Amino acid sequence: MAKVELINLSKIYPNGTTAVKDVNLTVEDKEFVVLVGPSGCGKTTTLRMIAGLEEVSSGEIYIDGKLVNDTHPKDRDIAMVFQNYALYPHMTVYKNMAFGLMLRGMSKAEIDRRVREAAEILGLTEYLNCRPRVLSGGQRQRVAVGRAIVRKPKVFLFDEPLSNLDAKMRVQMRAEISKLHKQLQATIIYVTHDQIEAMTMGDRIVVMNNGEVQQIGTPLELYNKPNNKFVAGFIGTPPMNMIEGTILRLEEKLLFVNTQDDIELEVHPKYQNILLRYLDRKVIIGIRPEDITVTLENPTSKGVSIRCRTEVVEPMGSEMNIYASSGKSTLVAKSRLEKEPELGSIIFFCVNLERCHFFDSDTSLAIR
Ligand code: ATP
């Protein structure tokens, strides 16, 4: 298996679209790295450049220490699994997996060994003689993964492989691919727009937007310490609440105040020093829905809660998402209230002040 390095990698398409801008990334040997971001952020283009399916405009790609910018895709020792995995309908599962190896002129015995080994890993042994049409979506996706495994490549590239599956199957395949990664001890680069997929599967995640890397880190690093407003809003569901306001001083304390929406929160002592330089300036406070406790009564201590009007309640089973407004701000909390609050009723969002995030209003960067 192998290490993959991208150095100042950029792609400008002939029509002038800059799809990827100056991406720097090192994927270590045996690492599972997920590229995640909204549609059009340049994930697929990055992956296709690594595979050699797209020409590099500038920058370098190294696989196992070897510069591969001008290496033909078939000589890069990479296998790619696409969203549209297009199996050959007239071939059996066995033949679908064996076909690529046959084209490469591998011996029958070696092909047989590899196909059976992959089928065993993927739980497909009993389907080897079936045609794809009798398989479920998940099983077909596994055959597509099998086609990649039999090649024993240095690096696996996955491009949204689970998008065509239903929600339940996606959860199951997510776990299977993670397990597979451990079993194969493979280097994997995986593209998705789904942040839950990224959080649950990646050793590290690369968040992209507008062709640029926003942050690289482990799932918990991104969740706990987002570098900027974009990452903060992208990782986590429902997304982090963001409110703009001003930092004011009240005696010994600092307050976050948004007079328009009647929001006043105390700044936790842990943030006092860093926010002093923002005194009388605008900042954005970020509050995750799971860092809010919903109460029906006004809490006695001041500066810890936001008075809101209930707008929408989404029961999720073990908890509910409560959307409520304070002035023009609509906020969302994950709540474990026993009973759903009535629409239009007044409730209080009590904020875990220690877990708030602050962002510079002008640059959108995290204030640390
Ligand atoms: P999605 O999740 O929708 O596939 P993505 O993050 O993978 O999005 P890319 O497919 O890499 O994004 O596209 C990045 C940008 O490059 C987009 O603005 C897209 O419109 C543009 N683009 C992609 N392919 C081409 C092309 N062949 N010619 C011109 N522009 C392109």
Image (tube, grey):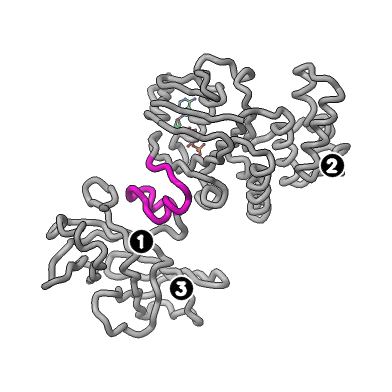
Q: Secondary structure at mark 3?
A: strand
Mark toward the start of the polypeptide (1 vs 2): 2
Do callouts 2 and 3 mark residues in contact (Cβ within 8 Å)? no
Q: Position of residue 177 (x, y in %)?
A: 65, 45
Q: Secondary structure at mark 1?
A: strand
Q: Is residue 221 above or below residue 62?
A: below
Residues in magenta, as a range: 214-235
Structural distance between the alpha carbons of marks 2 and 3 = 45 Å
> Can you tell which quarter of the image residue 356 is in?
bottom left
Residue at 24% across / 70% down in the picture? 265
**Dot 3 alpha-carbon crowd within 10 angstroms: few under 14, some 14 to 19, many 20 or more:** many
Structural distance between the alpha carbons of marks 3 and 1 = 14 Å
Q: Amino acid at mark 1?
A: Asn
> Can you tell which quarter of the image residue 82 is in?
top right
* Numbered mark located on residue 73 in the image: none
Q: Quadrant of the N terminus?
A: top right
Q: Amino acid at mark 3?
A: Ser
What residue does disc 2 label? 125
The answer to whether residue 159 is visible is: no
Do callouts 3 and 1 mark residues in contact (Cβ within 8 Å)? no
The answer to whether residue 342 is visible is: yes
Q: Secondary structure at mark 2?
A: helix
What residue does disc 1 label? 241
Q: Is residue 330 above or below residue 92?
A: below
**Dot 1 alpha-carbon crowd within 10 angstroms: few under 14, some 14 to 19, many 20 or more:** many
* Numbered mark located on residue 335 in the image: 3
